Image (tube, rainbow, N blue to C red):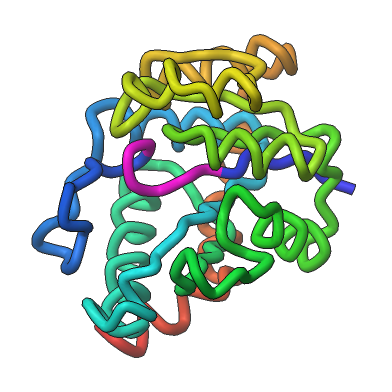
Protein backbone atom coordinates (compact mmCIF):
# COMPACT_ATOMS: atom_id res chain seq x y z
CA UNK A 1 0.00 0.00 0.00
CA UNK A 2 1.12 3.54 -0.78
CA UNK A 3 1.72 6.64 1.32
CA UNK A 4 -0.04 9.85 0.41
CA UNK A 5 -0.47 13.52 1.23
CA UNK A 6 -4.04 14.81 1.49
CA UNK A 7 -4.47 18.56 1.06
CA UNK A 8 -7.29 20.95 1.72
CA UNK A 9 -7.77 23.35 -1.22
CA UNK A 10 -8.83 26.84 -0.10
CA UNK A 11 -6.34 28.32 2.33
CA UNK A 12 -3.68 25.70 1.58
CA UNK A 13 -3.25 25.56 -2.20
CA UNK A 14 -5.34 28.58 -3.14
CA UNK A 15 -6.35 31.80 -1.44
CA UNK A 16 -9.41 31.55 0.79
CA UNK A 17 -12.15 34.07 -0.06
CA UNK A 18 -14.81 35.19 2.41
CA UNK A 19 -17.55 34.64 -0.17
CA UNK A 20 -15.93 31.46 -1.58
CA UNK A 21 -14.10 30.77 -4.83
CA UNK A 22 -16.92 30.75 -7.39
CA UNK A 23 -14.99 30.69 -10.68
CA UNK A 24 -11.55 30.11 -12.13
CA UNK A 25 -11.13 33.89 -12.40
CA UNK A 26 -11.35 34.10 -8.59
CA UNK A 27 -8.87 31.27 -8.02
CA UNK A 28 -5.35 32.33 -6.93
CA UNK A 29 -2.52 30.02 -5.94
CA UNK A 30 -0.90 30.83 -2.61
CA UNK A 31 2.77 31.74 -3.20
CA UNK A 32 4.95 28.64 -2.92
CA UNK A 33 2.08 26.17 -3.27
CA UNK A 34 3.05 25.07 -6.78
CA UNK A 35 6.65 24.51 -5.67
CA UNK A 36 5.46 22.43 -2.71
CA UNK A 37 3.31 20.28 -4.97
CA UNK A 38 6.27 19.73 -7.26
CA UNK A 39 8.46 18.66 -4.33
CA UNK A 40 5.88 16.18 -3.09
CA UNK A 41 5.48 14.73 -6.55
CA UNK A 42 9.23 14.43 -7.07
CA UNK A 43 9.52 12.69 -3.71
CA UNK A 44 7.10 10.01 -4.88
CA UNK A 45 4.02 10.85 -2.85
CA UNK A 46 0.53 10.28 -4.13
CA UNK A 47 -1.18 13.63 -3.63
CA UNK A 48 -4.90 14.20 -3.18
CA UNK A 49 -7.17 17.18 -2.54
CA UNK A 50 -10.07 16.84 -0.09
CA UNK A 51 -12.22 19.94 0.08
CA UNK A 52 -15.58 20.99 1.54
CA UNK A 53 -17.58 22.78 -1.16
CA UNK A 54 -21.01 23.35 0.38
CA UNK A 55 -21.59 26.17 -2.13
CA UNK A 56 -22.78 23.41 -4.50
CA UNK A 57 -25.74 22.29 -2.39
CA UNK A 58 -26.39 25.88 -1.31
CA UNK A 59 -26.99 26.66 -4.99
CA UNK A 60 -24.21 29.25 -5.24
CA UNK A 61 -22.39 27.37 -8.01
CA UNK A 62 -22.99 24.14 -9.89
CA UNK A 63 -20.93 20.99 -9.54
CA UNK A 64 -19.72 21.62 -13.09
CA UNK A 65 -18.18 24.95 -12.03
CA UNK A 66 -16.31 23.33 -9.14
CA UNK A 67 -15.05 20.57 -11.43
CA UNK A 68 -13.93 23.12 -14.04
CA UNK A 69 -11.95 25.00 -11.37
CA UNK A 70 -10.33 21.73 -10.35
CA UNK A 71 -9.44 20.72 -13.89
CA UNK A 72 -7.79 24.08 -14.55
CA UNK A 73 -5.99 24.00 -11.20
CA UNK A 74 -4.64 20.53 -11.95
CA UNK A 75 -3.43 21.61 -15.37
CA UNK A 76 -1.47 24.47 -13.78
CA UNK A 77 0.01 22.10 -11.19
CA UNK A 78 1.24 19.77 -13.96
CA UNK A 79 2.69 22.68 -15.96
CA UNK A 80 4.80 23.55 -12.89
CA UNK A 81 6.08 20.00 -12.46
CA UNK A 82 3.68 18.81 -9.78
CA UNK A 83 0.86 16.32 -9.82
CA UNK A 84 -2.43 15.68 -8.04
CA UNK A 85 -3.71 12.14 -8.42
CA UNK A 86 -7.34 12.74 -7.52
CA UNK A 87 -9.76 15.20 -5.92
CA UNK A 88 -12.69 14.49 -3.65
CA UNK A 89 -15.04 17.29 -2.68
CA UNK A 90 -18.03 17.32 -0.37
CA UNK A 91 -21.00 19.32 -1.73
CA UNK A 92 -23.05 19.01 1.46
CA UNK A 93 -23.96 21.75 3.93
CA UNK A 94 -23.56 21.47 7.71
CA UNK A 95 -27.13 20.38 8.40
CA UNK A 96 -27.00 17.43 5.97
CA UNK A 97 -24.97 15.36 8.44
CA UNK A 98 -23.01 13.51 5.78
CA UNK A 99 -19.97 11.31 6.37
CA UNK A 100 -17.75 13.17 3.90
CA UNK A 101 -17.77 16.77 5.13
CA UNK A 102 -14.69 17.45 7.25
CA UNK A 103 -14.21 17.00 10.22
CA UNK A 104 -15.59 13.60 9.19
CA UNK A 105 -12.89 11.45 7.53
CA UNK A 106 -15.10 10.11 4.73
CA UNK A 107 -13.25 11.73 1.82
CA UNK A 108 -9.91 10.41 3.06
CA UNK A 109 -11.16 6.88 3.63
CA UNK A 110 -12.91 6.87 0.25
CA UNK A 111 -9.73 7.86 -1.56
CA UNK A 112 -7.67 5.43 0.51
CA UNK A 113 -9.91 2.55 -0.54
CA UNK A 114 -9.88 3.61 -4.19
CA UNK A 115 -6.10 4.08 -4.40
CA UNK A 116 -4.93 1.51 -1.82
CA UNK A 117 -3.42 4.13 0.48
CA UNK A 118 -1.90 3.31 3.84
CA UNK A 119 -3.48 6.06 5.94
CA UNK A 120 -1.17 5.46 8.90
CA UNK A 121 1.79 6.34 6.65
CA UNK A 122 0.03 9.37 5.16
CA UNK A 123 -0.39 13.06 5.96
CA UNK A 124 -3.25 15.57 6.02
CA UNK A 125 -2.50 19.28 5.53
CA UNK A 126 -5.13 21.93 6.18
CA UNK A 127 -5.79 25.44 7.45
CA UNK A 128 -8.63 24.57 9.85
CA UNK A 129 -9.19 22.36 12.88
CA UNK A 130 -11.72 20.40 10.84
CA UNK A 131 -8.94 19.33 8.45
CA UNK A 132 -6.80 18.18 11.36
CA UNK A 133 -9.71 16.34 12.98
CA UNK A 134 -10.48 14.53 9.72
CA UNK A 135 -6.84 13.56 9.32
CA UNK A 136 -6.56 12.30 12.87
CA UNK A 137 -9.81 10.33 12.54
CA UNK A 138 -8.29 8.64 9.48
CA UNK A 139 -5.04 7.86 11.40
CA UNK A 140 -2.94 10.31 9.34
CA UNK A 141 -0.23 12.58 10.64
CA UNK A 142 -1.47 16.15 10.42
CA UNK A 143 -0.15 19.61 9.61
CA UNK A 144 -1.96 22.91 10.08
CA UNK A 145 -0.76 25.80 7.96
CA UNK A 146 -1.11 29.45 8.99
CA UNK A 147 -2.26 30.55 5.51
CA UNK A 148 -5.97 30.95 4.80
CA UNK A 149 -7.85 30.64 8.10
CA UNK A 150 -4.95 28.93 9.83
CA UNK A 151 -3.55 31.89 11.78
CA UNK A 152 -6.92 32.27 13.53
CA UNK A 153 -7.86 28.60 13.66
CA UNK A 154 -4.69 27.53 15.45
CA UNK A 155 -5.83 29.41 18.57
CA UNK A 156 -9.35 27.98 18.73
CA UNK A 157 -10.42 25.58 21.46
CA UNK A 158 -11.28 23.01 18.80
CA UNK A 159 -7.72 23.18 17.48
CA UNK A 160 -6.45 22.42 20.97
CA UNK A 161 -8.87 19.51 21.23
CA UNK A 162 -7.66 18.20 17.86
CA UNK A 163 -3.98 19.24 17.86
CA UNK A 164 -1.96 18.99 14.67
CA UNK A 165 1.27 17.04 14.74
CA UNK A 166 2.98 20.09 13.23
CA UNK A 167 2.23 23.78 12.59
CA UNK A 168 3.72 25.27 9.41
CA UNK A 169 3.69 28.77 7.96
CA UNK A 170 2.45 27.56 4.58
CA UNK A 171 2.31 24.56 2.26
CA UNK A 172 5.95 24.79 1.29
CA UNK A 173 7.01 24.56 4.95
CA UNK A 174 4.54 21.72 5.43
CA UNK A 175 6.11 19.88 2.49
CA UNK A 176 9.58 20.44 3.93
CA UNK A 177 8.46 18.93 7.27
CA UNK A 178 6.86 15.93 5.56
CA UNK A 179 9.98 15.28 3.49
CA UNK A 180 12.12 15.55 6.61
CA UNK A 181 9.91 13.03 8.41
CA UNK A 182 10.26 10.62 5.51
CA UNK A 183 13.93 11.21 4.76
CA UNK A 184 12.86 11.44 1.13
CA UNK A 185 15.00 12.75 -1.75
CA UNK A 186 13.44 13.06 -5.23
CA UNK A 187 14.96 10.75 -7.82
CA UNK A 188 15.38 11.25 -11.55
CA UNK A 189 12.87 8.44 -12.13
CA UNK A 190 10.24 10.24 -10.03
CA UNK A 191 10.84 13.50 -11.92
CA UNK A 192 10.39 11.75 -15.27
CA UNK A 193 7.23 9.91 -14.20
CA UNK A 194 4.90 12.89 -14.56
CA UNK A 195 3.85 12.35 -18.17
CA UNK A 196 2.66 8.77 -17.73
CA UNK A 197 0.75 9.62 -14.56
CA UNK A 198 -0.90 12.62 -16.21
CA UNK A 199 -2.22 10.53 -19.10
CA UNK A 200 -3.79 8.04 -16.69
CA UNK A 201 -5.33 10.52 -14.26
CA UNK A 202 -9.16 10.50 -14.03
CA UNK A 203 -9.40 14.26 -14.54
CA UNK A 204 -7.12 14.36 -17.61
CA UNK A 205 -9.67 12.98 -20.10
CA UNK A 206 -12.31 15.44 -18.89
CA UNK A 207 -9.89 18.35 -19.25
CA UNK A 208 -8.87 17.23 -22.75
CA UNK A 209 -12.51 16.93 -23.83
CA UNK A 210 -13.65 20.12 -22.12
CA UNK A 211 -10.80 22.34 -23.37
* Relative horizontal placement of residue 168, taking residue 208 as reference (left or right): right
The residue located at (81%, 42%) in the rendering is 119
* Relative horizontal placement of residue 122, taking residue 192 as reference (left or right): right
Residue 130 figure quarter:
top right
* Relative horizontal placement of residue 41, taking residue 185 as reference (left or right): left
Q: Is residue 35 visible?
A: yes
Q: In the rendered view, tell whether residue 128 sits above or below residue 112.
A: above
Q: How many numbered markers are drawn?
A: 0
**198 part of magenta stretch:** no
The residue located at (38%, 36%) in the rendering is 12
Residue reaching furthest to the left: 25
Q: Is residue 185 visible?
A: no
| Residue 109, x across and y down, in percent | 77, 58
Residue reaching furthest to the right: 1
* Relative horizontal placement of residue 92, taking residue 114 as reference (left or right): left
The residue stretch that appears in magenta: 7-12
| Residue 158, x across and y down, in percent | 55, 28
Q: In the rendered view, tell whether residue 7 sits above or below residue 142.
A: below
Residue 179 figure quarter:
top right
Work out whether residue 146 or residue 187 is closer to the camera in this orientation and state it: 146
Work out whether residue 35 or residue 111 is closer to the camera in this orientation and state it: 111
| Residue 10, x across and y down, in percent | 33, 46
Residue reaching furthest to the bottom: 209
| Residue 56, x across and y down, in percent | 35, 77
The residue located at (50%, 24%) in the rendering is 144
The quarter of the image holding the C terminus is: bottom left
Amino acid sequence: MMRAVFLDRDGVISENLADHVKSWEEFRFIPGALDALRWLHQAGFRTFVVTNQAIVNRGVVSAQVVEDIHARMLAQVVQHGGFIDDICYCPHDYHENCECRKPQPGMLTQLAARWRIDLARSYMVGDAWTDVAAGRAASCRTVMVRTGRGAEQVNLLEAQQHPAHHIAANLIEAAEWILYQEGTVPTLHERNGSLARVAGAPWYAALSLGG
